[in-house]
Amino acid sequence: MQRCLKWVKYLADFGVEATVVTVDAAQATYPVLDESLAADVPASIRVIRTPTSEPFESYKKLTGRAVPYGGFANEGKPGLVQQALRFVRGNLFIPDPRRGWNKHALRAVETLLAAGETFDAVLTSSPPHSTQLIGLELKKRHGLRWLADMRDPWTDIYYYKDLHHTPLAAWLDARYERQVLTQADAVLVTSPETERLFRAKVPGLAAGKIHVLPNGYDAPDFGQPSQPPADCFRITHTGTITELYHLGGLLGALTGALKRHPGVPVQLRFVGQVSAALRAQISAAGLTEITEYQPFVPHAASVAELLRATVLLMAIPDVPRNRGILPGKIFEYLAANKPVLCVGPAGSDADNLLQECGAGQALPYTDAALMQETLDALLRQWAINPNLDLPAASHGRYARRALTGQLTAIVGAPARSQAT
C-alpha cells in the first residue's frame, strides 16, 4: 500500500494530477489497518472510495481466524476446513478473492469518463492481482494507456501451490497473467529477478516494456535522530515473520555468540506479527530471556523502532524463486542507516542491494560460519563503541520522491509495440 501512497504524495511535484479509485475501508476486510498513513494523502488529491464484494467475513465466521495475509494461504498448518477453503479460494476466486471489488471500481471509472473527464493513463497495482483485470478491461473498452504495477509474482508466488488449483483454474489464471503482460503499455516490477521471471513467460515482450521501479523510503519519515541504545546490543525486526524465513541458523549462531561475548548484553526485539512456530524456535534456542515481542504499531512508531536499534534483522523466505524477493522494508532499513543482518540467498536482489549500499550482505540459511563471523565482528565493534550507525548514506536514489520522478517519466513515455 505504501508504494502507491507515496507515489500519490509526490506526483503533483512532477506535474501529474492523480485521481485515486480505491475501496471504502469500512466495507472491506484487512489483516491490519494503519490509519496514520492517511495523513500522507495530499488534500488536493481526489479519492473515490467504492463499495466492494468479498468473501472474507464468511471466512472469518467459518474458521474463527483473522483475514490471512496471503488470501487463504498462510494460516499456518491447515486443518480440513482450511484445506477445503484453500481449494475454494484457488478454484472459485480467480485470480483471488478480492476480485469482487472490480465491478465497483469499473463503475466508478465509467462514471468519470461518462462525465467527460479524460485521463492520460491508468495505473493498476497488485497484489491482489485481480486489480490488474480492471486495467485490462479499461484498455479493451477505452484504449487508455495502461501501466500494470506488479509488486510480486503472480502464478509463481511462493504459496501458489498451496491453493490446490485444478488444471482448468491454473490455465485460466496463467491466461490472465499473460494477457496483462502482453496488453499493458508498461509493466512495473520491483526487482530485476521479477523482470527476468516475467520475460521468461512471454519471450516476445518489447525490450523496454518492463521497468524495474523498486520500492523505497520516504525521507521525511526519517527526520528524527538515530538513538541506538548504549546499554544493550539491540537486534530489531519489524513486520511479519514466520518459520518460512528459516532463522534457525542465525538463532543458533546468536546463542553461540552470547557465550563468546558474555560482557555484551544482547536484546532481540520483534515488532509486528511473529508466528507461533518461530517463537517456539526462539525458545528452543534458549533466547527467550533476551527476546521481546511487540504487536503491530503505526508506521511512525515502526520507524522509531528502527532508529532505536543497534542493528536490524530481516530475512527472505526460504521458498522457490526467492532471489527476486525485495521486501519494501529493506529500503526503510537502509534509510535508518544501520547494519543489516539479512538471512537469505547469496547473489539475490536483496543481497546485491545491501552490498551496493554498504549495509551488509546476505547470510545464507545454513552458513553458520558466516553468521558467527558477522555477529562476532558486530559485537566486538559494539564493545568499543555502542553506536554502529553506518558512516555515510548511499541510498538516496531509493527515496520515494526520486522514484516518483521515474514513474512520471514512464507515464509520459509513448506506447511501444507489444507482443500478442
Image: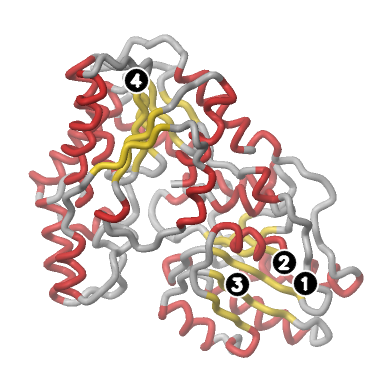
**Marks 4 and 2: in contact by CB < 8 Å?**
no
Amino acid carrying mark 4 in the image = Leu
Mark 1 element type: helix
Label located before the other in sequence (2 or 1): 2
**What is the image's colouring?**
secondary structure
Mark 2 residue crowding within 10 angstroms, few (<14) / some (14–19) / many (20+): many
Label located before the other in sequence (4 or 1): 4
Q: Which residue is mark 2?
A: 308
Q: Which residue is mark 1?
A: 376
Which of the 4 quarters of the picture holds residue 285? bottom right
Label located before the other in sequence (4 or 3): 4
Amino acid carrying mark 2 in the image = Arg
**Marks 1 and 2: in contact by CB < 8 Å?**
no
Amino acid carrying mark 1 in the image = Asp
| Disc 2/disc 3 C-alpha distance (Å) | 21 Å
| Disc 1/disc 3 C-alpha distance (Å) | 12 Å
Locate residue 59, reporting x and y percent. 18, 66
Q: Which residue is mark 3?
A: 250
| Disc 4/disc 3 C-alpha distance (Å) | 41 Å
Q: Which residue occupies 72% across, 66% down?
A: 308
Mark 2 element type: loop
| Mark nearer the viewer, 2 or 3 | 2
